[in-house]
Image (cartoon, rainbow, N blue to C red):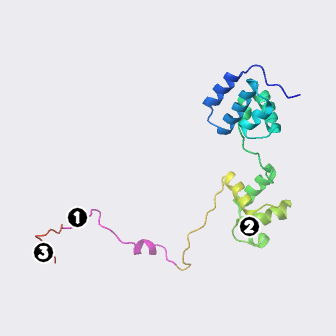
Amino acid sequence: MPVPLRTDFNAAQVRAVARISKDAAQTRRLLALAAIYDGARRSEAAKIGGVTVQIVRDWVVKFNAQGPAGLIDRKAPGQPSRLDGMHRTALSAAIESGPIPAVHGVVRWRIIDLCQWLWDTFEVSIAKQTLSRELRKMGFRKLSARPRHHEQREGAVEHFKKAFPRLWRRSRRLTASTPAP
């Protein structure tokens, strides 16, 4: 026995919703359900939707539960984060305080060092790319200092820069009657 469609819609209403929908997949599903409202068999609706009868049944269940909005594809939730609130708080504190060279073996944090710190402290294994994404969500940005020679004197850069005149003057136009110098 097939799952019956909800009674507060009819074929014309479903087609009207399909007409204004901006999601192509939702439109295709709604048109298949409209065919069922018109009396078509589920196998015919499956041909209209380009799917199997089981998938049409799933559409009917979603449509009955949530209406036309239930037929829109949603983003999959993905894998849950390996870091919880306690991990994020400790990681933020470690970044803000900076590494202790004698303890951590580094003078500045790199993402790979933070991955190792998380493993050493909490035994949480996390990839560099994932940790980078987590740090960006926490408001941290990867910053690197501009390289500078260790013996550079203060003010040497300003002295080296050229002092341009405040106003530029236009050069004289060369014309056919003006001889070239």
Relative to 144, 165 lies left or right = left
Q: Is residue 130 visible?
A: yes
Q: Quadrant of residue 53?
A: top right
Q: Is residue 99 visible?
A: no
Q: Position of residue 72 (x, y in %)?
A: 70, 36
Q: Is residue 17 above or below residue 179?
A: above
Residue located farthest toward the left when viewing the structure as drawn: 177
State the mark number for residue 179: 3
Tell me which residue sits at (79%, 27%) in the image.
64
Q: Which residue is mark 2?
A: 112
Observer-nearest residue: 148 or 134? Answer: 134
Q: CA distance from mark 1 to mark 2?
A: 55 Å
Residue located farthest toward the top when viewing the structure as drawn: 8
Q: Earlier in the sequence, mark 1 or mark 2?
A: 2
Residue located farthest toward the bottom when viewing the structure as drawn: 151
Tell me which residue sits at (76%, 30%) in the image.
63
Q: CA distance from mark 1 to mark 3?
A: 18 Å
